[in-house]
């Protein structure tokens, strides 16, 4: 029974393990992004997020490789949990960025429509 389970885990882990290069590459890019972000004053507040996401990808890569090589079920679950956490953080950040973008668009369009310099008497020459 144990042998069948190990074989199944190896088969399930193989597609993800074949993408280990990309998991590690994106992990390195995220860590570099976090380090470069930390060089700015405002970036110090958020630099930990991309670094954490990069570390999660490295941990997932290692766990998935272990699952493929050894047929280790707990390693497979650990790798999947790391990927789930990565995608959860990525999704939440994407939603936050979209909301900020939409709010900025609303204020930008509102500022163009109702801001100074628009409409009668608002221009640099006193209006019409």
Image: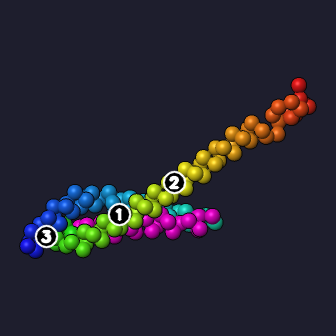
Residue ID at (30%, 65%):
80
Q: Is residue 123 or residue 39 the one in the foreground?
A: 123
Q: Which residue is mark 1?
A: 83
**Placement of 99 over or under 48, stated as above or below:** above
Q: Quadrant of residue 108?
A: top right
Q: Is residue 116 left or right of residue 27?
A: right
Residue 117 image label:
none
Label 1 with label 3: CB-CB less than 8 Å: no
Count of labels in the image: 3
Q: Quadrant of residue 22?
A: bottom left
Disc 2: CA contacts within 10 A as few (<14), some (14-19) or many (>=20): few
C-alpha separation, residue under disc 3 versus residue under disc 2? 39 Å
Residue ID at (69%, 45%):
107
First to last magenta residue range: 42-65
Q: Is residue 122 or residue 2 the one in the foreground?
A: 2
- Whether residue 63 appears in magenta in the rendering, the answer is yes
Closer to the chain start, of discs 2 and 1, is 1
Residue 95 image label:
2
Q: Secondary structure at mark 1?
A: helix
Q: Is residue 75 left or right of residue 104?
A: left
Q: Is residue 25 left or right of residue 108?
A: left
Q: Which SS type dominates the magenta stretch?
A: helix
Q: Which residue is mark 3?
A: 6
Residue 29 spot, x, y in % from top left = 42, 59
């Amino acid at each position: 029974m144990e042998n069948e389970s190990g074989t199944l885990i190896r088969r399930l882990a193989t597609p993800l393990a074949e993408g280990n290069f990309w998991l590690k590459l994106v992990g390195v890019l995220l860590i570099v992004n976090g380090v470069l972000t930390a060089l700015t004053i405002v970036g110090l507040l958020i630099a930990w997020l991309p670094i954490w996401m990069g570390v999660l990808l490295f941990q997932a890569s290692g766990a998935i490789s272990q699952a493929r090589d050894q047929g280790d079920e707990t390693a497979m679950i650990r790798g999947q949990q790391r990927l789930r956490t990565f995608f959860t953080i990525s999704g939440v950040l994407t939603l936050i960025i979209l909301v900020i973008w939409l709010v900025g668009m609303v204020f930008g369009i509102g500022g163009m429509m109702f801001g100074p310099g628009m409409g009668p008497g608002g221009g640099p020459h006193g209006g019409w």
